[in-house]
Image (cartoon, rainbow, N blue to C red):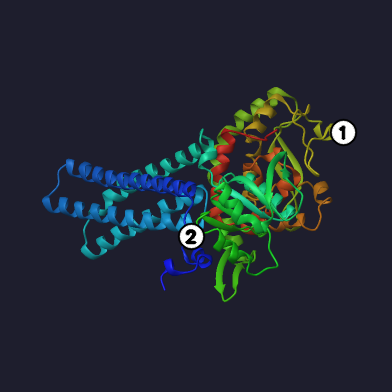
């Protein structure tokens, strides 16, 4: 029996879902954007390979050397382009944000380099070196720069909202509020929340952090709402007692949306600790527990020693200049020593350039009523105890430079949570004590994410996220971000 011969009440059920016109236009726009990105990638890689051939052969070379270089160039370009396209597609499926844009570039470059090394090993050709010295650095720099500029333009350009995926969030009030707040905090995901489907009857709008979002129906009406608004993504912000709800919702969304996202409260866990497995009737999420073994700590200590030794050389050169400025500005010593709490609750003396008057500790009691710090922290944006030179040192974090000596002594790490005062630790609850599981750091997620502009809860959450997810790669990334924060300081006072 053909579909045309079926009764009218069954005909709609057997026909494949038709994509809505507005969604089709958005999908076509996405395909054109990816095509332009692919064309640009191909042009950059081919241009870099061709330039390497021209530069190398311009100085004169034999015919056999030219042939070897041309073959290497063709292999490099073909392997790199194929790997980049495959990895970019996988990254689009499994991640979001700038990190997942850049990783395919770097991984595909490594694959292309491995292909060249394989050719060199099999044929004993020597034409690999020009590509390693010229093609790879130039092409990687161009590809990364293009992606960073595109991310900035998409996030801050005049059409930033139009580029963002239109999202409908489904769930209960608490879960929807948490999901919206998390999406707004992480600008890399960039969802444009156009409405919610809330399980509470009679509610017409939901206010989250002074922003209002319309409540367009209940979760069971999500598919109809998605069709009316032509959303790209439907986010389920809460679980359901109906095991078939997600499957039925995914079926009803066919042709009306591009993605169905299950948001969970599994937060502050790095991607490297999460693995997924599917079995009959279940989707299993594996989360590796944090490890504080000796080998990991030894690797972190080795990085600290290397960075501290390198940093102390220029610090020793500029210390006399800073010392002269401090002594000329106000009477008192050059350095400030204070007791702080380190790993496992051990007390140590932190070393800093003095940024306040010599009587700062005694004057604090008179300023307690003007405290603007979060939680147990004492902070004032216009602290009268800070000297003129001290304000400059604090703004650019130069007062922290002597702490590299604490790092070399093993009392601190280059990257880690902020070292607390003993009085602050006495106010900790059971959760916050986890900050003391690793060495405190000169810099960390707190320092590169806003410093004193953050609330106490935000600071603690960043520190606990670092404690549970740190790695050498994470440390190197934070060190690199710290350089940018020092040039453009925020929340430093």
Local secondary structure at mark 1 = helix
Rendering coords of residue 414 (x, y %): 61, 48
Residue at image position (71%, 46%) is: 459
Rendering coords of residue 112 (x, y %): 33, 56
In primary-sequence order, the first of circles 2 and 1 is 2
Q: In the rendered structure, are the residues bearing label 2 and label 1 in contact, judged by CB atoms less than 8 Å apart?
A: no
Residue 341 can be seen in this image: yes
Crowding around mark 1 (Cα neighbors within 10 Å: few <14, some 14 to 19, many 20+) is few
> Is the residue 102 above or below the residue 314 in the image?
below
Rendering coords of residue 315 (x, y %): 57, 37
Residue 443 can be seen in this image: no
Local secondary structure at mark 2 = loop
322 to the left or right of 16? right
Whole-number angstrom distance, CA of label 2 to CA of label 1? 65 Å
Residue ID for mark 1:
369
Q: Quadrant of residue 381?
A: top right
Residue at image position (72%, 38%) is: 210
Crowding around mark 2 (Cα neighbors within 10 Å: few <14, some 14 to 19, many 20+) is some
Rendering coords of residue 17 (x, y %): 48, 60
| Disc nearest the viewer among 2 and 1 | 2
Residue ID for mark 2:
17
Q: Which of the pair 484/28 is nearer the observer?
A: 28
Q: How many marks?
A: 2
> Is the residue 81 above or below the residue 447 in the image?
below
64 to the left or right of 443? left
> Is the residue 354 above or below the residue 85 in the image?
above
Q: Quadrant of residue 439?
A: bottom right
Q: Which of the pair 132/331 is nearer the observer?
A: 132
Q: Which of the pair 91/2 is nearer the observer?
A: 2
């Amino acid at each position: 029996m053909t579909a045309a011969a079926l009764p009218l009440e069954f005909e709609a059920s057997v026909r494949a879902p038709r994509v809505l016109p507005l969604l089709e236009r958005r999908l076509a726009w996405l395909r054109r954007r990816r095509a332009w990105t692919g064309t640009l990638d191909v042009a950059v890689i081919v241009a870099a390979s061709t330039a390497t051939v021209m530069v190398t052969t311009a100085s004169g070379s034999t015919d056999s050397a030219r042939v070897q270089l041309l073959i290497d160039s063709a292999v490099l370009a073909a392997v790199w382009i194929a790997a980049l396209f495959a990895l970019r597609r996988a990254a689009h499926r499994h991640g979001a944000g700038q990190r997942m844009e850049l990783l395919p570039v770097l991984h595909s470059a490594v694959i292309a380099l491995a292909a060249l090394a394989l050719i060199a090993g099999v044929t004993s050709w020597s034409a690999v070196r020009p590509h390693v010295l010229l093609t790879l650095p130039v092409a990687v720099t161009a590809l990364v720069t293009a992606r960073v500029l595109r991310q900035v333009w998409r996030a801050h350009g005049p059409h930033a909202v139009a580029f963002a995926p239109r999202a409908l969030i489904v769930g209960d009030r608490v879960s929807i509020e948490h999901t919206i707040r998390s999406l707004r905090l992480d600008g890399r995901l960039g969802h444009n929340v156009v409405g919610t489907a809330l399980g509470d009857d009679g509610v017409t709008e939901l206010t989250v952090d002074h922003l209002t979002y319309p409540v367009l129906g209940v979760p069971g009406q999500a598919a109809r709402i998605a069709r009316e608004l032509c959303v790209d993504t439907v986010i389920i912000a809460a679980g359901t007692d109906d095991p078939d709800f997600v499957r039925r919702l995914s079926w009803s969304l066919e042709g009306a949306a591009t993605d169905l996202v299950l948001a969970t409260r599994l937060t502050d866990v790095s991607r490297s600790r999460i693995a997924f497995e599917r079995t009959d009737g279940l989707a299993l999420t594996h989360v590796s527990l944090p490890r504080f073994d000796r080998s990991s700590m030894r690797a972190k200590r080795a990085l600290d020693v290397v960075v501290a030794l390198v940093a102390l050389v220029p610090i020793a050169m500029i210390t006399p200049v800073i010392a002269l400025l401090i002594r000329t500005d106000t009477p008192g010593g050059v350095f400030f020593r204070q007791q702080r709490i380190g790993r496992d609750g051990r007390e140590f003396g932190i070393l800093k350039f003095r940024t306040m008057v010599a009587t700062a500790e005694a004057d604090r009691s008179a300023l307690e009523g003007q405290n603007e710090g979060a939680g147990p922290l004492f902070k004032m944006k216009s602290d009268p105890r800070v000297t003129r030179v001290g304000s400059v040192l604090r703004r650019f974090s130069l007062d922290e430079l002597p702490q590299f000596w604490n790092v070399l002594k093993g009392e601190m790490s280059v990257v880690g949570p902020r070292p607390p005062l003993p009085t602050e630790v006495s106010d900790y609850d059971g959760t916050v004590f986890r900050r003391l599981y690793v060495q405190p750091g000169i810099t960390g997620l707190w320092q590169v994410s806003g410093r004193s502009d953050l609330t106490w809860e935000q600071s603690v959450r960043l520190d606990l996220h670092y404690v549970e997810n740190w790695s050498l790669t994470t440390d190197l990334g934070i060190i690199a971000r710290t350089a940018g924060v020092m040039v453009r300081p925020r929340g430093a006072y």
